[in-house]
């Protein structure tokens, strides 16, 4: 699986207004709802899952990147969205620096291997400077 499988060949990059990671997660989830990637009635439950996962350990991986994610039985396929913050968002990242790119993704609950594979592929891509610059 690659990013095109759930973002499409020319993904929208949302301009984030968030001041912190929690607001960024909410903005990205709202985008998924608005674009019918997740049902509105599942919005709060999914947001809670992502935030619970984020509370256990920040997904700010360095290089200005945050990868909030969760698995849930409320979706049937992997979905994701990318947000960009020009001002930077405090994300409790490993390198202590603000995050400028946030990629939120959700994986169906029963697809743990796909979850790990997706996370690994996203991390590889986002660690490539030319890919980040392209976003």
Image (cartoon, rainbow, N blue to C red):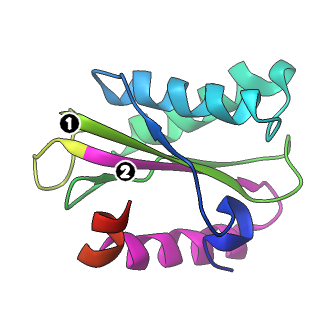
Tag 2 and tag 1, C-beta contact below 8 Å = no
- 13 shown above or below 78: above
- Work out whether residue 129 or residue 26 is closer to the camera in this orientation and state it: 129
Q: Which of marks 2 and 1 is nearer the N terminus?
A: 2
Residue 18: where, in percent of width, then height? 35, 22
- 61 shown above or below 41: below
Q: In which quarter of the image is residue 113?
A: bottom right
Chain part drawn in magenta:
100-127
Mark 2–mark 1 Cα distance, whole angstroms, equals: 15 Å
- Work out whether residue 108 or residue 102 is closer to the camera in this orientation and state it: 102
Indicate whether residue 124 is drawn in magenta: yes
Residue 43: where, in percent of width, then height? 73, 24
**Which residue, given by chain and number where applicable, does mark 1 sit on?**
88
Residue at 39% x, 30% y is: 16
Residue at 36% x, 69% y is: 126
Residue 111: where, in percent of width, then height? 78, 67
Question: Is the residue marked by circle 2 packed among few (<14), some (14-19), or many (20+) residues within 10 Å?
Answer: many
**Which residue, given by chain and number where applicable, does mark 2 sit on?**
59
The reply to whether residue 128 is in sight is no
């Amino acid at each position: 699986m690659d990013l095109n499988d759930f973002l499409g060949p020319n993904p929208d990059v949302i301009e984030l207004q968030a001041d912190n990671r929690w607001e960024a997660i909410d903005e990205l989830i709202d985008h998924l709802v608005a674009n019918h990637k997740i049902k509105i009635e599942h919005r709060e439950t999914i947001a809670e899952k992502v935030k619970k996962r984020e509370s256990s350990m920040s997904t700010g991986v360095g290089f200005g990147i945050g990868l909030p994610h969760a698995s849930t039985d409320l979706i049937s396929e992997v979905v994701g969205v990318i947000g960009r913050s020009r001002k930077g968002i405090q994300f409790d990242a490993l390198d202590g620096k603000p995050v400028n790119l946030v990629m939120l993704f959700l994986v169906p609950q029963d697809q743990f291997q796909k979850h790990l594979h997706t996370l690994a592929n996203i991390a590889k891509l986002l660690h490539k400077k030319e890919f980040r610059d392209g976003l």
